[in-house]
Image (spheres, helix red, strand yellow):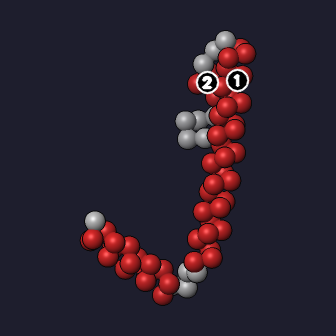
Amino acid sequence: MWQKNEDFKKEIGVLKEEGFKEEQSKWYIDKLHDYNEIKDVAQMVMGRIAVHEQTTVRAVHEEFRMSDDD
């Protein structure tokens, strides 16, 4: 645990040397949260469509040409 903490401190130091600012990370984290919330809602909609059509979510994904990575 202590070693991980030291490794993180080194990584933070390298990022700061490269000009990375803490405010930037907050912005990126906020955008990731937004993305995840939207993705969760999309998955719920896909689930509702699957129930309505009496099929699987995978089949709905295929119908909308979505891959497992989407």
Instruction: Give the amino acid type for the residue marked by disc 1 in the picture.
Output: Arg
On the question of residue 65 being in view, the answer is no
In percent of width and height, residue 18 lies at 51, 84
| Residue 57 vertical placement versus 53 (above, below) | below
| Residue 52 vertical placement versus 25 (above, below) | above
In percent of width and height, residue 60 lies at 66, 24
Q: In which quarter of the view is residue 11 placed?
A: bottom left
Foreground: disc 1 or disc 2: 1
Residue in view at x 71 percent, y 30 percent: 45
Q: Nearer the viewer, residue 53 or 8?
A: 8
Residue named by callout 2: 57
In percent of width and height, residue 13 lies at 43, 83
Categorize mark 1 by other alpha carbons within 10 Å: few (<14), some (14-19), many (20+): some
Residue in view at x 70 percent, y 45 percent: 38
The span from disc 1 to disc 2 (Cα, nearest Å) is 9 Å
Residue named by callout 1: 48
